Image: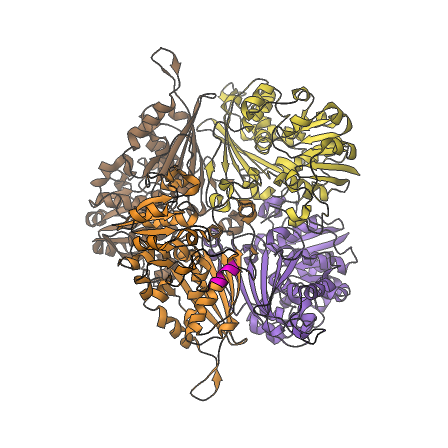
Chain colours: A brown, B orange, C purple, D yellow
Amino acid sequence: MIRAGIIGATGYAGGELVRLLSGHKNVEIKWFGSKSYIDKKYAEVYRNMFEIVDDVCLDDNIGELAKQVDVIFTATPQGYLASILTEEILSQVKIVDLSADYRLKDVKVYEEWYKIEHKSPEFIKEAVYGLCEINRDKVKGARLIANPGCYTTCSILTAYPLVKEGLIDADSIIIDAKSGTSGAGRGAKVPNLFCEVNENIKAYGVTTHRHTPEIEEQLGYAAGKEIKVNFTPHLVPMNRGILVTEYASLIKRAGEDGVMKYPSYEQVKAAYDKYYAKEKFVRVLEKDVCPETKWVEGSNYVDVNFKIDERTGRIIMMGALDNLVKGAAGQAVQNMNLLFGQKESEGLELVPMFP
Amino acid sequence: MIRAGIIGATGYAGGELVRLLSGHKNVEIKWFGSKSYIDKKYAEVYRNMFEIVDDVCLDDNIGELAKQVDVIFTATPQGYLASILTEEILSQVKIVDLSADYRLKDVKVYEEWYKIEHKSPEFIKEAVYGLCEINRDKVKGARLIANPGCYTTCSILTAYPLVKEGLIDADSIIIDAKSGTSGAGRGAKVPNLFCEVNENIKAYGVTTHRHTPEIEEQLGYAAGKEIKVNFTPHLVPMNRGILVTEYASLIKRAGEDGVMKYPSYEQVKAAYDKYYAKEKFVRVLEKDVCPETKWVEGSNYVDVNFKIDERTGRIIMMGALDNLVKGAAGQAVQNMNLLFGQKESEGLELVPMFP
Amino acid sequence: MIRAGIIGATGYAGGELVRLLSGHKNVEIKWFGSKSYIDKKYAEVYRNMFEIVDDVCLDDNIGELAKQVDVIFTATPQGYLASILTEEILSQVKIVDLSADYRLKDVKVYEEWYKIEHKSPEFIKEAVYGLCEINRDKVKGARLIANPGCYTTCSILTAYPLVKEGLIDADSIIIDAKSGTSGAGRGAKVPNLFCEVNENIKAYGVTTHRHTPEIEEQLGYAAGKEIKVNFTPHLVPMNRGILVTEYASLIKRAGEDGVMKYPSYEQVKAAYDKYYAKEKFVRVLEKDVCPETKWVEGSNYVDVNFKIDERTGRIIMMGALDNLVKGAAGQAVQNMNLLFGQKESEGLELVPMFP
Amino acid sequence: MIRAGIIGATGYAGGELVRLLSGHKNVEIKWFGSKSYIDKKYAEVYRNMFEIVDDVCLDDNIGELAKQVDVIFTATPQGYLASILTEEILSQVKIVDLSADYRLKDVKVYEEWYKIEHKSPEFIKEAVYGLCEINRDKVKGARLIANPGCYTTCSILTAYPLVKEGLIDADSIIIDAKSGTSGAGRGAKVPNLFCEVNENIKAYGVTTHRHTPEIEEQLGYAAGKEIKVNFTPHLVPMNRGILVTEYASLIKRAGEDGVMKYPSYEQVKAAYDKYYAKEKFVRVLEKDVCPETKWVEGSNYVDVNFKIDERTGRIIMMGALDNLVKGAAGQAVQNMNLLFGQKESEGLELVPMFP
């Protein structure tokens, strides 16, 4: 049995980790960390867990935790893990960090977008960006996994094959993202009240959202150069789900007849299939079928598809995932499976729930 | 492997059966029956099933089906199974009927409330009412299971211990029930459109809802006499979930001091525990905690609790379940497990999804 | 022009008052009181008011306010008005109090249910319970209006004619109420977050909700005796709207043939018409039509109807209103109109918005 | 009194026309046309209208209607008005057409995108595109108004000043639009059922939505050249509201120092103010405030704002309106007011409803 500890077990992502790990046959959760609810029964914080989880919430003590478990999941605010991580801890335990602390390789970019000082930049280099479909091999041998953001997982996987294959102009990418409200966390804030979110849609963090540099860095690796994208998140009146609609200019190439042409449907489809045909958790939908968040709810799937617009020379790429699963806890478990030699989909073979 | 066939696989209850059976390690679905979508790929009707189910929908042919499978689930309109069931079929295959055709023992009551003629009343007697927590032993040896209704499962389990133990006046029971919209089915009707249901709540079927006699019959068995209840369903703007709030007059008994008293919290709690303490799928909540549908969503649990009101001499009992799981497909699988000697919770150990 | 001041203008009820008074041709709002947002532009707190309201929020200063305006609306927490009201203020200005401070005539009942000491019980006697349809004449000459609660307005108006006419046993009344989430106010609390309320329904305050004694007092006047009722509120995932479903035992009377009978549909309908036929804001629906909250949204209407169940000898009464309009701000404006000799419906002729 | 007739009074846009016209002091609705509900009381189709509208629905008879009323609103499927309009009718009555029949000046474009033959192209030329803020003067003298589409009204008004002033490259415009579900109409279709829309978001009509050429034509006039845009609509789980997020490349200009620069915040703001400062129904929000659909719900406002992204050289423009008001019925009434010399905002001074 893999012994797991969670720091930040009472946020929505932490709660989802508990749900998923409870169904994982080779994992035992040994530590339900929650600064806000110390000594309170976990099942009183999340009553769906009544008679399923009997533990009480514990304080954060990563040193003690490192001795007791094999893997620590940190579902904590930005800057927290960076402020407490040490070589000693990393020598004892694997860490899957759901915060952004080790996602960006350039510490200056981190500090600029997150407006906080990074307290342990020495671990950034070894941290592996845990987007399993792309970095699977690196994940396997890592000690520290930077689990990708929810928007970024969806945004990157939706565009990755086309950027990698050079079918689109990576600098033309515009990402219009829509998220359910669980992405905003369980903090008690007026803008997240039911009556403020319900029957409403808005953009937020326009031009300043912190997932922007993460997308740029990862798609930049695929493009083989630095890129800049526009990323605009929106808040949608639903609990779960992220949908991204991405726009990019297609690159014309000379066809057999020497005429410059946009890539065809088949060529674009082939690019997606090249990277995803064997991926269990990425589903390239059938022609003309648009992804919908409901079709992946509760599961670890990402559904992607695209539509070519010859009129404008652009392609519209679409991707959908459950922000708490593939966008957070599910991907964290997928990373854990890779770290510990488990079947990659262990505990994640969840059929999406509809309706 | 248990070979299963579904007639009516493209309704919401049928879809949920597919979801649950897909996760059951000893079941293989051999027949996705759907009159409306013959020859269409199942995953085109429910795209959450893309790359999970490859089958196409088949026509209804219970005779052929009976030869090919071990168990048939019928998630069909009222009257359908009654019109085609024969001894020959029942001698070949077990049937779990999610419709109401064999739930009521008195065929006249059925015909009065459902306004249709019953075409095979000869099987009513042998059919077992598949409320597992109450009829577990009878279910095990049955050929034909009448899978209880969604409202009825919730209504009966919430009141059963108190009726059985004589703590309340069974004729005083008033059931005010609230259901998510999946209970209305996937038929294209104006009253079920998003804009008609959203931001709205209403009662419907007041005094005439067909689950009324089913509740009366089953609670009548517990009471040891015929009873009449008021049952009022309401439509709530959410996908899943049923909450029942039940009111009944408490019966005073002489205490040790000879004074007539209402039952105490402890006495009522003891009654619930007597019947449910060992039941995996019925959770009697802690004192003063009111059941919420979200805490059972996606799972086979029923959460129940109560509050005594000495001012009025009444008790308020509350119960919550997921209408598509414990209220339909989950209970059907639970019955199948009993029929085939499986662990009763096999395929049903689903952790409720929150949020 | 009637000069109005609002204390508590930034809660949901306060916001609705601003919306309604903005559309009232004879009212000018002179004071937007909000302790939480002093000096902030009102339109920054409620951006729907951008370019409609230019004022900034002011501190609470009832003494100063009393000099500047003709009427004060207090949309404040329980106990606030009671703690600051004086004879001097009341001699200068009319007050419509949306809190519960002066609704209950028995100060002990108030203190028992609200768990706070009443600081100015000397004004309770003169306060008029502002349920316009019932107390219209008393309202006209009052100085201090106790504007009824949202649940209570709906609960009382739904049952009033039958209690008054003695058609039902008032002690058998059970009120199962369902409310949208704006009733919970704009306070930042975890249970009111979108993800906690959405896709969920629950009862709360079972047997202890503070609107219970208010209903009992008012229906008790109608019954001509003290009564006790069960009142159970539920939280529904929608912004606005209250639906009550009320159960009561019908009283049999001797018919012309001397046989004891339950009242007929026509008799009950006549009772409703007796009190409401001329009431603009109470709509008795056509036979068998159940009230829906969406049909009154944004308006000052209460829709009521009923269904007789001869099987159980009970009647099911139903009522629907918009909790922020007829359940709060709309009724407050209706009271103001009566106080100042305005047409009772002035500023309230709002057509319900659908969908 | 202006006598008005509505053809298509029982769709959602028709229903909203009834709501708005009921509150217009100089209008009387003489004809509630609805082919689907002939002879049925209008208030039985929309029960919010109970005791407000007493009329019954009438068949479509435009010839008769033209004789009885001053203005006809057609809220009908595409192609309907084109198939019945004649010079005789137009000589008798003003028409405000909420369908798309006369919005596009090039009949070939209409036939290509709508896939139907245009039956009366002879009236296209004289029809005035009723976007009041832009075509106010032309509207005043017209006989036939092509009332703009919901998405188009929002999309055009959001970008218009910047296109007109040449601050952005009109061919770079990408419009990502999100709509509430009332835009899909009241037809009984599975994809519009509550359980299919709720807790879900998806794109639809990608590259093929019919509002695309309408936007291109109108913004093309502003640009002074033909343009092509990408337009992608999304379905959001809410009743009302459209939000558009538009992306475009800013055009650099030489500053006073001769250096090429992107327009500043002040320059862009000045462009918006130039066109909208005096417009009652277009609100240019304060800096950094993103439009939200809830802030305009139920009203005729369009809220717009923008954010400059120097990193990518693009601007993000945002606009929000209520699709049934400014996006349909409200704008139709605004056009009617202009046609009949009424105050332009008569009947439209509706304060947005929040929450």
**Whole-percent x, y for residue A288 in the image:** 42, 30
Q: Across the whole image, how many numbered discs are drawn on residues?
A: 0
Q: Is residue A119 visible?
A: no
**Whole-percent x, y for residue D180 in the image:** 54, 40
**Whole-percent x, y for residue C154 in the image:** 63, 61
**Whole-percent x, y for residue D333 in the image:** 70, 36
- In the rendered image of this protein, does residue A258 appear above or below residue D161? above
Instruction: Please say whether residue D354 is one of the residues in the magenta stretch.
Output: no
Q: Nearer the viewer, residue D341 or B194?
A: B194
- In the rendered image of this protein, does residue B147 appear above or below residue D284? below
Residue in view at x 64 percent, y 66 percent: C159
Task: Classify residue B26 as left or right of residue C236.
Answer: left
Q: Nearer the viewer, residue D141 or D81?
A: D81
- Magenta part of the protein: which range? B106-113
Q: Nearer the viewer, residue D74 or C121?
A: D74
Which picture quadrant has residue A119? top left
Task: Classify residue B174 as left or right of residue C83.
Answer: left
Which picture quadrant has residue B349? bottom left
Residue in view at x 58 percent, y 33 percent: D154
